């Protein structure tokens, strides 16, 4: 009973996944909050948190699928948290502008599922598939965010 409650709390990102409209979008917000907390910390700590959240997401999503009885149930949004955090892997500084662009970019890639994200979701088992497509979306969004930061944002500075 305790394990099931803990898994459901973590899988839903402390309840974000239970929001009836756009739970994936709402579930990405805790990732932005984690990034905000890490804003003035070292990149090494960012990577430790990123890896820990990704591993936790894989394990928790795997267990949550068993409790919910279906693959990648909408309430499971811990994978969005992991993907959203990974989006900022090429961003040396965190600010509101980059947060908004990164948030939108991640949501776009997570929803559209451009290859290989769609392949990962469809072919990887359990928590690997649930979380893997979001990690791929985070990498794709991160590359776009990097290019925007490098080539577009300087024109607005």
Image (cartoon, helix red, strand yellow):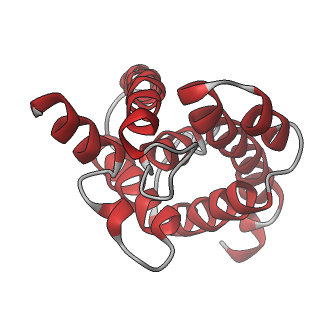
Q: Left of 67 or right of it: where is 4?
A: left
Asked if one can make out residue 89 in the rendered structure from this viewpoint, the answer is no
Front residue of 40 and 25: 25
> As drawn, which residue projects farthest toward the left?
2
Front residue of 110 and 67: 67
22 vs 65: above or below: below
Front residue of 139 and 135: 135
Asked if one can make out residue 129 in the rendered structure from this viewpoint, the answer is yes
Q: Residue at x 46, y 58 (%)?
A: 28
Q: Where is residue 23 in the image (x, y as percent from the top left)?
A: 46, 67
Q: Residue at x 17, y 29 (%)?
A: 3
Front residue of 7 and 100: 7
> As drawn, which residue projects farthest toward the right?
115
> As drawn, which residue projects farthest toward the front?
69
- Quadrant, the C terminus: bottom right
- Count every numbered label the image shows and give the total: 0
Q: Where is residue 21 in the image (x, y as percent from the top left)?
A: 47, 80
* The image quarter in which residue 134 lies: top right
Q: Where is residue 20 in the image (x, y as percent from the top left)?
A: 41, 77
Q: Residue at x 70, y 76 (%)?
A: 156
Q: Where is residue 126 in the image (x, y as percent from the top left)?
A: 57, 27
- Quadrant, the N terminus: top left
* The image quarter in which residue 122 lies: top right
Q: Which residue is drawn at 26% across and 60% down?
A: 15
């Amino acid at each position: 009973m305790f394990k099931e409650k803990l898994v459901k709390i973590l899988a839903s990102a402390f309840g974000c996944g239970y929001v009836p409209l756009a739970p994936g979008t709402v579930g990405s917000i805790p990732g932005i909050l984690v990034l905000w907390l890490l804003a003035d910390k070292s990149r090494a700590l960012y990577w430790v948190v990123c890896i820990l959240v990704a591993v936790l997401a894989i394990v928790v999503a795997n267990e949550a699928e068993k409790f919910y009885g279906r693959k990648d149930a909408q309430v499971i949004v811990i994978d969005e948290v992991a993907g959203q955090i990974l989006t900022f892997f090429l961003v040396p500084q965190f600010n509101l502008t980059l947060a908004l662009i990164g948030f939108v970019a991640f949501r776009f890639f997570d929803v559209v599922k451009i290859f290989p994200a769609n392949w990962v979701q469809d072919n990887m088992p359990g928590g690997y598939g649930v979380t893997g497509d979001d990690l791929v979306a985070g990498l794709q969004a991160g590359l776009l965010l990097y290019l925007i930061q490098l080539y577009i944002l300087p024109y607005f500075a």
